[in-house]
Image (cartoon, rainbow, N blue to C red):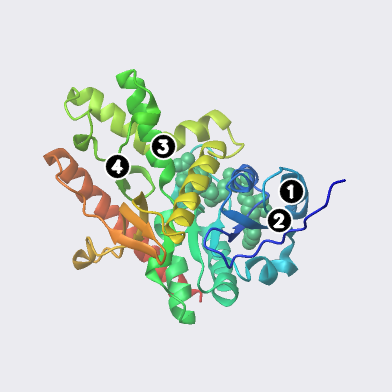
Amino acid sequence: MFSVVKRSFSSSSASAYKVAVLGANGGIGQPLSLLLKLNHKVTDLALYDLRGAPGVAADVSHVPTNSTVKGYEPEGISEALTGADVVVIPAGVPRKPGMTRDDLFNTNASIVRDLAKAVSENAPDAAVCIISNPVNSTVPIVAEVFKSKGTYNPKKLFGVTTLDVLRASRFVSEIGGTNPVNEKVTVVGGHSGNTIVPLLSQTNYKSLDTDVRDKLINRIQFGGDEVVQAKNGAGSATLSMAQAGARFAGAVLNGLAGEKDVVEPTFVDSPLFKDEGIEFFSSKVTLGPEGVKQIHGLGELSSHEEELIKEAKDTLIKNIKKGVDFVAQNP
Ligand code: NAD
Ligand code: LMR
């Protein structure tokens, strides 16, 4: 005879967490939800979208890991968010060929602003991971909304730049003929074009010929365009982004659980260049039980990297201001 033991999952124990995905029916949202279902720290997975999330939830829920999965339609957003430890936001439109990420601003800014309001009201203590583009502006939008509601915790707001890190590992390994799993490249700055700065001088690839180096950096900076062009109007990176999002959310959960030495580059409220008016910057961050535990400096840079950082800062200051101004003008 078998006896059936019923277990319920709550987010009260150290390795049991509720994660909410906003935009779960999208190109990123669906595979990201699947990958989060495979993360054993996730015991409660709340999938929200304007449409289709209950179907994604029903599908993902059959994967036999120790978690409950529930899909929510717009009227269920409060319930989806209540009690969430981590909220991941890939809601918004993706690029088509010929567009920059900044061209998405007009559509995605208000989507992200409104979702940030819902997070502020229903999950004010959650760690919030922003995937929606343009990340350099959507993260400041979320910060401004949280500030206006009195719930801003700079230690718990993250722009997800992990895809740049994955691409850097992959692309250097293609040059080196190595296993990308072993290639660690720190990528700093932001998440668009010249704000993406891979620190190759801190890797085994510090002595590449200038033309090889420049092509490699350009490929890391514009890797997103490769996918947008190949998809030819059907969107941008979704599968590699789901992997990047799951890795980053997994790192946040590892930090919340008190694991040691959890370090990922991410776009956060950063002291590194605040004196130059740049409120957010991506660099290596140690993640801990309260979210951000330590923001690392950039380390030693080559003179070429110094130039790239300068260019990145010039763009970032405008991208960040655009997000801040949007909320001021469209609260
Ligand atoms: P998609 O169109 O396939 O999916 C977006 C989903 O968001 C849809 O299911 C849509 O219904 C949903 N949505 C829209 N408005 C919503 C709202 N108000 N509330 C809840 N859900 C809403 O797009 P995608 O390919 O998944 O890309 C999503 C976003 O992620 C884009 O902005 C894209 O540029 C960005 N992105 C970021 C990175 C990164 O590295 N940070 C990488 C790839 C894509
Ligand atoms: C990416 O880097 O793939 C994403 O930001 C999507 C895009 O628009 O390129």
Which residue corresponds to the image point at 22% horizontal and 48% vertical from the top-left? 309
Q: Indicate if the residue with disc 3 has its beta carbon within 8 Å of ligand 1.
A: no
Quadrant for residue 304, please give it.
Answer: top left
Marks 2/3 in contact by CB < 8 Å: the verdict is no
- Secondary structure at badge 3 equals helix
Which residue corresponds to the image point at 45% horizontal and 61% vertical from the top-left? 256
Query: Between residues 195 and 151, which one lies in front from this camera angle?
Result: 151
Q: CA distance from mark 2 to mark 1?
A: 7 Å
Q: Residues within 10 Å of mark 4 (few under 14, many from 20)?
A: many
Which badge, 2 or 3, comes first in the chain's sequence? 2
With 203 as the anchor, is 39 left or right in this view?
Answer: right
Which badge, 4 or 3, comes first in the chain's sequence? 3
- Secondary structure at badge 1 equals loop
Q: Amino acid at mark 4?
A: Thr
Residue indicated by mark 1: 61
Q: Amino acid at mark 1?
A: Ser
Image vertical order of residue 148 relative to residue 324, above or below: below
Query: Residue 68: which disc?
Result: 2
Q: Residues within 10 Å of mark 2 (few under 14, many from 20)?
A: some
With 279 as the anchor, is 67 left or right in this view?
Answer: right
Query: Residue 186: which disc?
Result: 4
Which of the two marks, 1 or 4, is nearer to us in this view? 1
Q: In this view of the protein, can residue 135 be seen by the observer?
A: yes
Which badge, 2 or 4, comes first in the chain's sequence? 2
Image vertical order of residue 171 relative to residue 285, above or below: above
Marks 2/1 in contact by CB < 8 Å: the verdict is yes
